[in-house]
Amino acid sequence: MSRIYNFSAGPSMLPMEVLNRAAAEMTDYEGSGMSVMEMSHRSKVYQSIIDDAEARLRRIMGIPENYDVLFLQGGASLQFAMVPMNLLKTSADYVVSGEFSGKAYKEACKYGSICLAATGEANHFTKIPAQSELSLTPGADYLHICQNNTIYGTTWHYIPETASPIVADMSSCILSEPVDVSRYGLIYAGAQKNMAPAGLTVVIIRHDLISEPMSFTPTMMTYAVHAKAKSMYNTPPCYQIYILKLVLEWLENLGGLTAMQKLNREKAALLYDYLDGSSFFRPIADPDSRSMMNVTFQSPSAELDDAFVKAAAAAGFSNLKGHRLVGHMRASIYNAMPREGVEKLVAFMRDFEKANA
Ligand SMILES: *Cc1c(COP(=O)(O)O)cnc(C)c1O
């Protein structure tokens, strides 16, 4: 068996330990005589899996007692609608710092009065707006941000000051570093970047923000329903939650989010230091807004970009092509990407630079 280094932006790599453990438990989970895929979600054995996943997530992220943890479906994209349907009463502020926050903004506009607090469009989303550039509405129901912009490779390195609860899309950075959950009203994330396979969305919501949604809100899109039923209103994405549990075990064994952050910083520094020193490749994101998870860069020409992506794939470094909207290259180096993968990629880039400069 041979594994490649998969730099995909999502779905993306899972830790080898997790995959091996899932394989070992595939047909008989802890003597139950069945796979987790075959279990009733109402069974005792499954209840212990989902309880363990929630307890570990709470412990690892330091989620305060007054927050509910919901295991939902529909991807991060369904949250673009669920958030306004449940939280919007008068008006809300949105920062558009990339593609997904743009989608969230457009979706929210269908449901009420939405103010654009800032947009990074003028600088092609290479930069996160500064606090002084945010026009915030007094009394807004919430401020929506996308914490890490997966496509453009930028991230918020500060939490905006606002009297409104902050709603953050953390799909591509959750579990990558410690976060002060109490500074947020709601955090949501699609699982397929740093948590589990696609099909699970984690929502962390401050309990007092759960209220009567807009009258036309489907039952399945009502936070109160899922919170009351402890994510068991209907069949939850059982297997994804089980993999999340394994990923959280792996993270805890590694030393939790502080240890993970240290490793992620080292991995990102390997790439950015090389890019900053290269006269061939060039980093795209503004230095003050650089993402630790998605590193965007380019070569001197579109032809060389193509040649690089092809040569890299042939050498076992896959999915380095940037998002179709921006082109160039992107190396997504989520938690499960080993340091060795980044070291080898940088060595490959050095060789490519030498051969093509
Ligand atoms: C991947 C991603 C999304 C879209 O997630 P889906 O689960 O496909 O809906 C939204 N926001 C961010 C920041 C992402 O990285």
Image (spheres, helix red, strand yellow):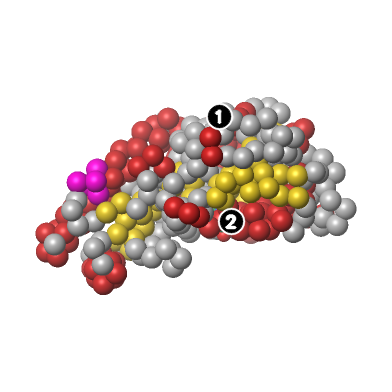
Which amino acid does the dot numbered 1 rest on? Asp
Query: For the magenta stretch, what is the residue range?
Result: 273-277
Residue drawn at 46 percent across, 65 percent down: 325
Q: Nearer the viewer, residue 266 or 283?
A: 283
Q: Callout 2: 10 Å neighbours few (<14), some, many (20+)?
A: some
Q: Is residue 274 magenta?
A: yes
Q: Which mark is residue 180?
A: 1
Total marks drawn?
2
Q: Is residue 27 left or right of residue 72?
A: left
Q: Is residue 97 left or right of residue 339?
A: right
Q: Please say if 178 is above or below 346.
A: above
Quadrant containing the C terminus in the rendered view: bottom left
Query: How many angstroms separate mark 1 from mark 2 (CA)?
Result: 25 Å
Q: Nearer the viewer, residue 116 or 36?
A: 116
Q: Which mark is residue 290?
A: none
Labels 1, 2: front one: 2
Please identify the quarter of the rendering in which residue 181 is found.
top right
Residue drawn at 82 percent across, 47 percent down: 213
Q: Nearer the viewer, residue 160 or 311?
A: 160
Mainly helix, strand or loop, the magenta region?
A: helix
Q: Element under label 1?
A: loop
Q: In the image, residue 324 lies at what x, y percent? A: 44, 68
Q: Which mark is residue 102?
A: 2
